[in-house]
Structures are given as structure tokens and as C-alpha cells.
Amino acid sequence: MNLGRALSPLLDVNHLRVTLQTAHGPAEALRGVSFALERGGTLGLIGESGCGKSMTALALMGLLPEGATGSGSIRFDGRELTTLDEDTLCKLRGDRIAMVFQEPMTALNPLHPVGRQIAEPLRLHRGLDAAAARAEALRLMERVQLPNARSRQGAYPHQLSGGQRQRVVIAIALACGPDLLIADEPTTALDTTVQREVLDLLDELRQGSGMALLLISHNLELMAARVEQLAVMYGGVIVESGPTRAVFERRAHPYTRGLFAARPRLGADRAVPLATIAGRVPALHEMPPGCAFADRCTLAIEACRSALPPAASVNEGHSVRCIRWHAAP
Amino acid sequence: MTTPVLVEAIGLGKRYRLPRELLLTPGAVAHALDDVSFRLSAGTTLGVVGESGSGKSTLARLVMALEAPSAGRVLFEGRDLQTLAPEALRHARRDFQIVFQDPFSSLDPRMSIARTVAEPLERLAHVAHAERRERAAAMLEAVGLNAAQDLDKVPHEFSGGQRQRIAIARALVTHPKLIVADEPVSALDVSVQAQVLNLMRDLQQRLGLAYLFISHDIAVVERMADDLLVLQQGRVVERGRSVDVLHAPVHAYTRRLLAALPQPRW
């Protein structure tokens, strides 16, 4: 490994912009997203539906919807992904970059036994023969703590519970020992107790292998417990980012504060209504030129609406895209 | 002061026959719900928590008389709905309505909002055509939508939170006494979830509604419920005032549900 590669982050995304073709004409879903993820690090992307967090993951995986165009740079392990051809990308996907989706039932093929689905990337990327791939698949099933792994190799997805299916999806993602795992709402479809088991499993596997994790979720509690770095997205922009603890304690962006206030908490006074954020997320085709949150923000001034606020530094490594963050109580 | 009991469930059970595995032997019997009893008073909220497969949604279907129980009875204002003739049951339905989890699949994509919201009036309450649109408009305003603008739109023109408001407006249009809410905010984002929860509390106070509020999210249930049932594998494992159950859980399963919540460190 050369020195330049060792020093650069594993994943370095810069000024990523994505334009989708919608019924209302072209609309920008990502408006200049930049972040970096170190080897073995953990980064969370948080925000509401339509904020661009899943779109970011799809762009990284080369899975953008048809007709979508983009610009900017995505460097993975020192290599620019945006100029690679599809064949080369296919060699990276499922091998060095893997993804876990929200809904394990739709991510798995209902017609193939799960053992075979776990073996598939091993045959494709590692060139293992059928017997070797099967043996390795069994080892992976044991590693993700699927009960009775041996007898489950021939099971079909519908014969497993939601938590077990998600373990299978994780086993597929981990098959080739990726450097980066992208997990898009990996536990949203699961019960709370199962959620914790799956997240514990991901933590354990990550610590054993030095894999980096990009976790996408709208769940604040989950982020607090699972990632070191956090990026809050709104309207296709990262509006606040930094060490998770710093973001949670300082909550520099008015949107971050709104999200925290809206969350029901155990032990809160029931007579006091939950705080809400007035208005709604602007639709893609009506995204304003300035701060997308301005229309819902109590601190907004005219300057907020004229141009996208530049990133301001709150503290070392903690930045916010808000020109009014000092004005916050 | 005692409030009248609106719904009473007595020894409620529901069994389903699993698919046959041998040619000549019937499939096994699964107990989705087993010996569940509770009382829900007018104007109050009974929360039901438990994991998937614990019987929460089966309970909702039985209370709504969408299915007949295998054992026990559901009394609505003292009447066993299962004993009513079909026409009488349909009339009774105006008093209890349901809101489902997913506002994307619970609204007919081809039906205008005016028709969607007014439909229960047509089927259940025999309200004259001219009056229906007015009532639908009033309900949309009550849930914070703009009737003048929204009545003739179709569901895809609305966000998830707005659709759930439409679903609530439809449930309210017959002026029911009970709303069964099956995971009503689980599909919504945090900020939208807060708006819908506030709306439901506000409507309860204004209209004296009772809720059977089903959720797997304990913080949400704590905010909404006066009383609580904890279901595990179809059985009630813990019950009581929700404050008591959540702050001093007795059953191991309730403790496990609470312990599984990610602990905030801030």
C-alpha cells in the first residue's frame, strides 16, 4: 500500500450533486454533499424521508434511479469511483463495498435457499467452487449467529423470521469481508429487542474486522448508541456534522434542535404537547435557492433565503450550515 | 367520579388453523390471542404494547368486529357486536373506527379526498349526498388540512403525515366514540409523528374520544395511554396504569421491552 492511500480516508465524498428527473422536471436531490469516513470508522446519516440520505447511499453504490445525473467526487480507498466503468464497479460492489437494506424480505430472493444466496458473492468475487462457497456460507451463518445454521442452509426466506432474514442479509454483505458496509435503516422493520441484537452483531463484526460503517437512519437514539460521527441531512444538504456527542450536546442547527424536541421521551409530562416543526419538508421541485429549512425556522432572516449557507465551524470537526446558529438559545 | 365503560373484552381468544402439512391430518392450531380481558372507559386511552406476533393486531380486528373471536366476547356499550344482525352491525360501526399504520396503502389512490373522507357517511350513516362534502370539509379542517384546497386532490399529492391526517379525518367523520389506532405513527418521521400525536390528544380532549392505541414504541405509548396492556404471544403478561407499568414493570417481558430501548446518553 502506498503512503498516499494509507493517509487518505477510506471514503471521501466531495460536492456530490444528484439531479433526478421528476414529473415537474429536473430536481436536485443532493445539493453538494461532502463527508469523509476513516477506515474502521462509523458515520451516521440522519434526517427525514426525502432529505437525501438514501440517495447518498444509492449514489455510492452506483444504484441511482434511471435518468439521474450527478457531479462531484466519490473517492474510495484513493480511487475515484465516478469515472469507473460498470464492470469495474461490479467488482467493487458486494466485495469491498457492501450494503444492507431496510426490508430483508425484498432484499432476498424468495426463490433461492438462503445458503445459496450467501454463497453467491463468494463464487462471483472470490471464485470459490460450489463446495468451498457452501462451507464458507455455513461459517458466515454461524458468524451472524443464525440458530441451527447447518439445517437452515436450505431454508427459503419465508421460512425465517424478520430478524433471522436480516442476519442472512448481513451475512451476504459480509461474505467477502468488505472495507465499507452501508446499512440503510437496517433495523427499522424489526422489533425493538431484535433491533438491539442485530446492531450488537454489526458492532461486534465491525470491531473484529476493521470494517467501516455508514449507518443511515431517522432514529436519534440509535445514532447516539452506535456511531462516532454524525451528519444531519435536510433538503439534500448536510446541515450539521461532527462527533456524535458534540452534535447531540450542542445541536447547533435549528433543524437538529427541532428533531430532538419532537421526540417523545419516557417520563415526559403528558399534558405538555410535543414540540413540532411548523410547516413541512419542501418538495424536490420547490427547493429554494437558499437554506431549505428557512421557511420552517424561527431564526430565519432574509439572508438565509438568498444563498445556501456556507459551512461554519462550531468547534474542531463540528460544522453547521446556518448563518444564524449563534442566535440560538 | 367514574366514567362509563365503552368497551369490555371478556376472556377473548382467537385461534387460527395453520396450513395442513399431511394429506389427512388437519394443520396445527395457533393461538393468536388467549384469554384477554380489559375495560376501556369512554374518553380514555388504553395502550397495547408487544412485539410482532404478540397478538396486537388480532386484538384490533376483534374489537372492530372484523373477525369473530374463537372464545370470549367483546361488548361495545354493553352489546355483543357478534350477536347483531349484519344491518344493525353496520349501523353500529359508525361508533367505532380504525386508523391503520401505513397511510400509503390505507387510502384508495384513485379516490378524491372528499370521497375518501365522506365514504363512511354513505355506507354507515345514511347522510344525504349534499351534506357529506360539508362534513368531509369540516373533518379535514379539524385535522389541520385546508379543505378548500385539498378536497378534490388524490392521495399521491400528500406527504405521509398529511395522509395519516386524512385517514384520521375519515375515521372521525361519523363522530365515533372509539378509534382503534394500530401503529398510527410508526411509518412517520419524528417531526411528523409529533404533529399527529398532538393532534390525536387534542381531538380526544375536544371530542371525548376513546382510543385503543397499539404500538411497539414504548415512549409513544407512554405519551398517549392512561392504561396499558402488555401482550406476549397472545397473552396479557402485565396490565395497569401506564405510569405504574412503565416505571415499575413487574413482568420480565415488560422489563426486557424497556431495556431494549436504546439508552440516550445526552
Image (tube, coloured by chain):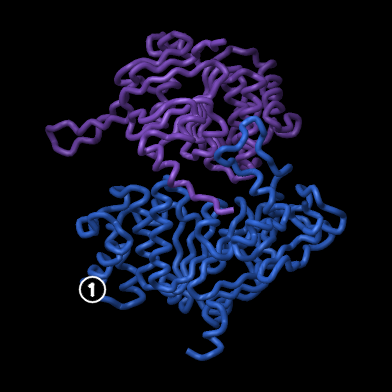
* Residue sitting at x 62%, y 13%: B127
Q: Quadrant of residue A28?
A: bottom right
Residue that extends furthest to the bottom in the rendered view of this protein? A2
Q: Position of residue A246 (x, y in %)?
A: 64, 62
Give whichever of B260, A85 is nearer the camera. Answer: B260
- Closer to the camera in the image, B107 or A173: A173
Q: Is residue A36 visible?
A: yes
Chain letter, blue in picture: A
Question: Can you see residue A289?
Answer: no
Q: What amino acid type is highlighted by mark number 1?
A: Ala
Tag 1, which secondary structure?
A: helix
Q: Quadrant of the N terminus of chain B?
A: top right
For disc 1, the marked residue is A132
Taking the view exactly as shown, the residue that stands out farthest to the left is: B24
Judging by colour alone, the chain drawn in purple in this rendered image is: B
**Which x, y percent locates residue B40?**
48, 18
Q: Is residue B81 left or right of residue A132?
A: right
Judged from this view, the residue extending furthest toward the front is B248
